[in-house]
Amino acid sequence: MTNAVSLQSVEMRFGATTAVKSMSLDVRSGEFFSILGPSGCGKTTLLRMVSGFLQPSSGKILINGQDMTHVPANRRPTAMIFQSLALFPLMPVWENIAFGLEVRGVSKAQRRREADRLLELIALPGYGDRMPHELSGGQRQRVAIARALAIEPQVLLLDEPLSALDLKLRQHMRAELRELQKRTGVTFIYITHDQSEALAMSDRIAVMNAGRLQQVGAPIDLYTKPATSFVAEFVGENNIVSGTVVDTFDDYVVLEGIHGRFIGRRGAVLQRNQKARLYVRPEALTLDAEGEDNKLTVVSKRFDFEGSFATAHTVLHHEQSPLNMQVTIPHKKLHQVPEIGSSFTTGFSKQDAVVLAHD
Ligand code: ATP
């Protein structure tokens, strides 16, 4: 399989700040690839280097196998969609969509045909003569995407395009964007700091922190097999127990700390006596601890009903350092919810917990 984009030891320095640190990454052709990380970790900088709006301080950028490091933005097979959409307010929708074609000297009749075809693609047929202010936020978003697709990019770069929309619309647009990507086959590189968005939409995700790549993988792999404690803490909810490695056997690690002794999968190279953290998802903790590898007695402090499930916020008692633990209670077990203030024993299997070095 060819790579749509390859970054080879790409670095970007702004004076004393290194926004992207020697990063190597391959994005495959036709995939929906997300770059996920907290604000300021270098996501936009990375995308702007791929688009050609920014020259890397060092390293190479290949697009479809060709070195594009020094090729200007307008001669790259990429298009970029920004956080703020900036449709032209005085131009009807179809002219907005066909703007890039006008710049390329395409005739008006052909531009109109192409705009109408793209309006079908984004499920807004017949909207061509409306003005941008006559559209909803989600519709404007789709028009911005059609405008980017009009120039037939091989790679579409999207910088948090849904961040301005409300939650319901954002969820709807997630599905639409993914569907559109599959239908067009265009490679999407999508930036977000919202882990649930990245998990829901992507074929693969690169998690970044402080200018560095932490892990690249399919959403389920990042969720079930985080490679670093940053990924374990950034992607999804995790309960965290700290301790020292006291034993390792097969693929498992025994961790002992002030909150007890626990066993989990070995998620990284770990030596005896090393400080580490055990991560266990709230949904891996059961109300029937009988027969589990790990057991702990907690006190229920709060209970959040979330519709299809509930979360019990509990505390593992310790004089100096009480430990918060979240336990997911599936809908069918809601009748077993422990009363606030009561103590109960929860547990988890060693396969469902991962132990990682604390970085
Ligand atoms: P956000 O999610 O908030 O948009 P981001 O992950 O996209 O953040 P970047 O915009 O890539 O982060 O910024 C990465 C780092 O580089 C930040 O510390 C930022 O302050 C710095 N930076 C970005 N652009 C410049 C610039 N032109 N000059 C100096 N520093 C910059």
Image: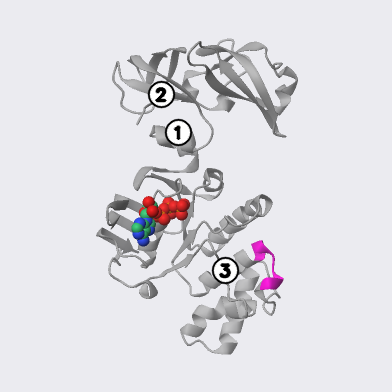
SS of the residue under disc 2? strand
Asked whether 136 falls inside the magenta stretch, the response is yes
Residue 215: x, y in percent? 38, 41
User: Which residue position holds label 2?
Assistant: 277
User: Which residue position holds label 1?
Assistant: 232
Q: Residues within 10 Å of mark 3 (few under 14, many from 20)?
A: many
Q: Residue at x 35, y 18 (%)?
A: 250
Q: Residues within 10 Å of mark 1 (few under 14, many from 20)?
A: many
Question: Can residue 3 be seen?
Answer: no
**Which residue is most to the right?**
335
Tell me the quarter of the picture where residue 147 sits.
Answer: bottom right
CA–CA distance in space, label 1 to label 3: 34 Å
Classified by dominant secondary structure, the portion drawn in magenta counts as helix
Residue 107: x, y in percent? 53, 89
User: Which residue position holds label 3?
Assistant: 144
Of residues 134 and 101, the one drawn nearer to the viewer in this rendering: 134
Quadrant of the image where one finds ligand 1: bottom left
Mark 3 CB lies closer than 8 A to ligand 1? no
Mark 1 CB lies closer than 8 A to ligand 1? no
Earlier along the polypeptide chain: callout 1 or callout 2? 1
Q: Amino acid at mark 1?
A: Ala
